[in-house]
Every structure is written in structure tokens, then in C-alpha cells.
Amino acid sequence: MSARLPRLVFAVVLISCAALYMMSVPSMPEVIATLFAGNGLANGYMTRDFYLPYVLVFGLVLPLLLAFLISVVPGMLNSRRATRSTDGELVSDEGKLAVVTPFGWWYASLTAVFSASMHSLVVMANQLDPPQLANTTFCILLFGFLAATFIWAAVVIVRVQRETQ
């Protein structure tokens, strides 16, 4: 699998998320409910001036960091080292790298979409009086993200094991 499509999708997702944040946060109340109790009612707040950088860090910087750590750093490290097998041949991790790199971009995209979804829930919660989070939607998003993370990790492990056999 080429890493071009996952990188393109990641770029489009990040730009879309940035647009969502920049368009929605200014229209939110001056004090935004950001923490919710088990019953969905707000019990923690942030100012809008603090919420925008907060959502940008978790919605854009975190996915960029994940993409960098999963998809870019291993390639940089792999290009600097080569090991020798027992018979003296140079061995690299190119096969493993070819498997992991595209999955890193996809996972970073998933993380950005999850962050944008959570932000959308906060926006909708703050439109109610009193602010209340949609607990069912929140649980579906959270467990969906966790399930996708475990599936992603399992697929990467299986594909890397196949590549090394």
C-alpha cells in the first residue's frame, strides 16, 4: 500500500477539522461547558479564549504528532541504521516500515476525526440550556474509537508478522 493516499486523506481531514474549529468556536458562548457528569449535565467550564487553543492542540497538534511518531520517525531511524544478519548480509526493516507507515497516517486521521466529533458534541451540548452532553452519542464515539484503535493495532501486528516471515 502506497503512503500517498493516506497522507492526502490526513491532510484533507486536518484542514477540514481546522475549518470546523475556526468556524464553530467563535460562535460558542463566552463560557463553554467542557466537562460533563455521568448524567450529561455540565460540571466544568472553560472560557472561549482558552477553549480554542485547547481544541486546536487536541484536534490538530495531537494527530500531527501521532503521524510524525508513527509514520515519519521510523523511516528516519531506519535510514540511519542497517544491521547484519548472521551470514553477513545487510538487513533493514523496510518491509515492516512499508506496513506501518500508511497505517500511521490512517490512525492520525482517525484521531483527528474523533477529536472533531467530540468537539461537535461539546458544541451541541452548549446549545442547550442548561448545557447537556448527549451521553449515548458520546459512548458510541468513544467505544467506536477504542475498538478502531484495537483493530488498527491488531492489523498492524499481523501485517508486520507476515512481512517478517
Image (cartoon, rainbow, N blue to C red):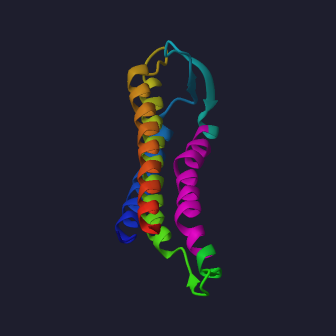
The magenta segment: 51-76
In the displayed structure, would residue 155 be above or below residue 164? above
Of 78 and 67, which appears nearest the observer?
78
Q: Is residue 23 visible?
A: no
Q: Give the dominant element type of the magenta stretch: helix, strand or loop.
A: helix
Q: Is residue 122 left or right of residue 136?
A: right
Residue in the picture at 61% in, 42% down: 54
Of 71 and 80, which appears nearest the observer?
80
Residue in the picture at 41% in, 52% down: 155
Residue 14 screen position, x and y as percent: 45, 56
Residue 134 screen position, x and y as percent: 41, 21
Residue 57 screen position, x and y as percent: 59, 48
Q: Residue furthest front?
A: 87
Of 119 and 7, which appears nearest the observer?
7
Rendered-image quadrant of the N terminus: bottom left
Tell me, yes or no, whether the highlighted magenta stretch contains residue 5.
Answer: no
Rendered-image quadrant of the C terminus: bottom left
Q: Is residue 39 visible?
A: yes
Of 129 and 103, which appears nearest the observer?
103
Q: Is residue 29 left or right of residue 99?
A: right
Quarter residue 36 falls in: top right
In the displayed structure, would residue 71 be above or below residue 91? above
Quarter residue 8 falls in: bottom left
